[in-house]
Image: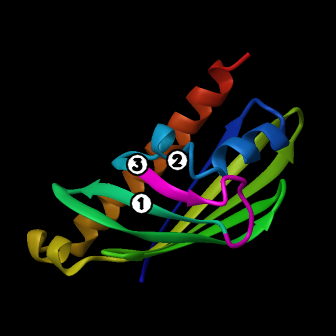
Amino acid sequence: MSKVTSSILINKPIEQVFDFAASPINGPKFIPNLSENTNINPEESGVGQTFDWHFNMFGLSLNGKAKITEFKKPDKAVIETDGNNKTTWTYSFDKEGSGTKVTVEIDYELHEDILRKFVDKMVIDKMNQRSADQMMENLKTILEAES
């Protein structure tokens, strides 16, 4: 398994950041290459919530199912996925002054079609790190733009 980690400070209260980031409804708004999350059940986020995900990675259409396996508001949320890619997304939230430090840690196994497309796994890992960093920047931009 490979891993990427990214953190950012968002100038919004921890509850607001957690509620937005931990909701599968909002994932496509800030996660690069995530086309959509569908069949979200139940609508309210919490342990046991499931959804289908659709992702475009390196020109390949990937999809599968996801489940929230840990949900400790407003500190931590863990989402596990399976399907074309098996991943674990761990979001941690820490209050810093009037803002929130958000850290995402993504453990992933690469789909064999992606490995065949790229000779060097390190290239894929670097691209995934950039995507994780962009995800955090997107989250910050969206939340700090809200009044």
Which residue is disc 3 drawn over?
36
Image x and y of residue 3, in percent: 47, 72
Part of the protein shown in magenta: 36-48
- Circle 3 residues within 10 Å: few <14, some 14–19, many ≥20: some
Mark 3 or 2 closer to N-term? 2
The answer to which image quadrant residue 58 occupies is bottom left
Q: Amino acid at mark 1?
A: Trp
Q: Are marks 1 and 3 in contact (CB under 8 Å)?
A: yes
Please state which of residues 24 and 39 is positioned toward the viewer in this rendering.
39
What residue lies at 82% left-to-right and 42% top-to-bottom? 14
**Mark earlier in primary sequence (2, 1):** 2
Q: Which mark is residue 53?
A: 1
- Asked if 55 appears above or below 99 in the picture, the reply is below
| Protein image colouring | rainbow
Disc 2: which residue = 27
Label 2–label 1 contact, CB within 8 A: yes
Residue 18 position in % (x across, y down): 75, 47
Say which amino acid is labelled 3: Glu
Q: Residue furthest right?
A: 97
Mark 3 or 2: the one toward you: 3
Of circles 2 and 1, the one toward us is 1
**In magenta segment, residue 45:** yes
Image position of 92 with respect to 142: above or below: below
Q: Position of residue 57 (x, y in %)?
A: 26, 57
Q: Position of residue 111 (x, y in %)?
A: 26, 77
